[in-house]
Image: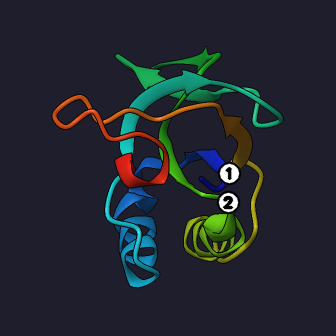
């Protein structure tokens, strides 16, 4: 059994379709998507409510979680980076985190490891 990795990407919501298409083009067929809120260097944003501007400390983003074989990590990172980056390369484009996964078990069949991905 080869090494398995978890790739977590925090991206702008409107970039989801582009990222999904880029991943499909390299053979990635599954991922989990969660709406998340947070802040980094972007430090939140301002909104207008009933004519009054106020500061919102958290930005809405999407978190993608992809479990893959170790040898696919670099192509997944490149696909996400290329498709999620804004044309201007602005702050807030997102981050990618890569971590090891000890085990994967498919509930339906009991398959383990790469066979369960």
Residue tagged 2 = 70
Residue 39: percent from left, percent from top: 70, 26
Residue 85: percent from left, percent from top: 65, 68
Quadrant assignment, res 33: top left
Residue located 39% across and 53% down the image: 115
Q: Is residue 83 left or right of residue 95?
A: left
Residue located 57% across and 65% down the image: 84
- Secondary element under disc 1, as helix, strand or loop, is loop
Residue 28: percent from left, percent from top: 41, 68
Q: Is residue 30 left or right of residue 102?
A: left
Residue located 33% across and 55% down the image: 30
Q: Residues within 10 Å of mark 2 (few under 14, many from 20)?
A: some
Query: Which comes sooner in the sequence, label 1 or label 2?
Result: 1
Q: Nearer the viewer, mark 1 or mark 2?
A: 1
Q: Is residue 34 left or right of residue 98?
A: left
Q: Are marks 1 and 2 in contact (CB under 8 Å)?
A: yes
Q: Is residue 10 left or right of residue 106?
A: right
Q: Residues within 10 Å of mark 1 (few under 14, many from 20)?
A: some
Most foreground residue, 46 or 24: 24
Most foreground residue, 87 or 68: 68
In this rendering, the count of numbered labels is 2
Residue 57: percent from left, percent from top: 65, 16
Most foreground residue, 25 or 107: 107
Residue located 27% across and 33% down the image: 110
Residue tagged 1 = 3
Quadrant assignment, res 48: top left
As measured in the structure, the alpha-carbon distance from the residue carrying label 1 to the one carrying label 2 is 5 Å
Vertical placement of residue 16 versus 25, above or below: above
């Amino acid at each position: 059994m080869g090494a398995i990795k978890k790739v977590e990407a925090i991206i702008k919501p409107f970039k989801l379709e582009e990222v999904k298409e880029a991943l499909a083009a390299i053979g990635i067929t599954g991922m989990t998507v969660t709406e998340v809120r947070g802040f980094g260097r972007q430090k939140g944003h301002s909104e207008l409510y009933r004519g009054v501007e106020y500061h919102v400390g958290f930005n809405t983003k999407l978190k993608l979680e992809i479990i893959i074989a170790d040898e696919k990590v670099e192509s997944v990172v490149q696909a996400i980076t290329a498709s999620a980056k804004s044309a201007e390369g602005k702050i807030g484009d997102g981050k990618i985190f890569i971590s090891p996964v000890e085990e994967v078990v498919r509930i339906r069949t009991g398959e383990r490891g790469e066979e369960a991905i």
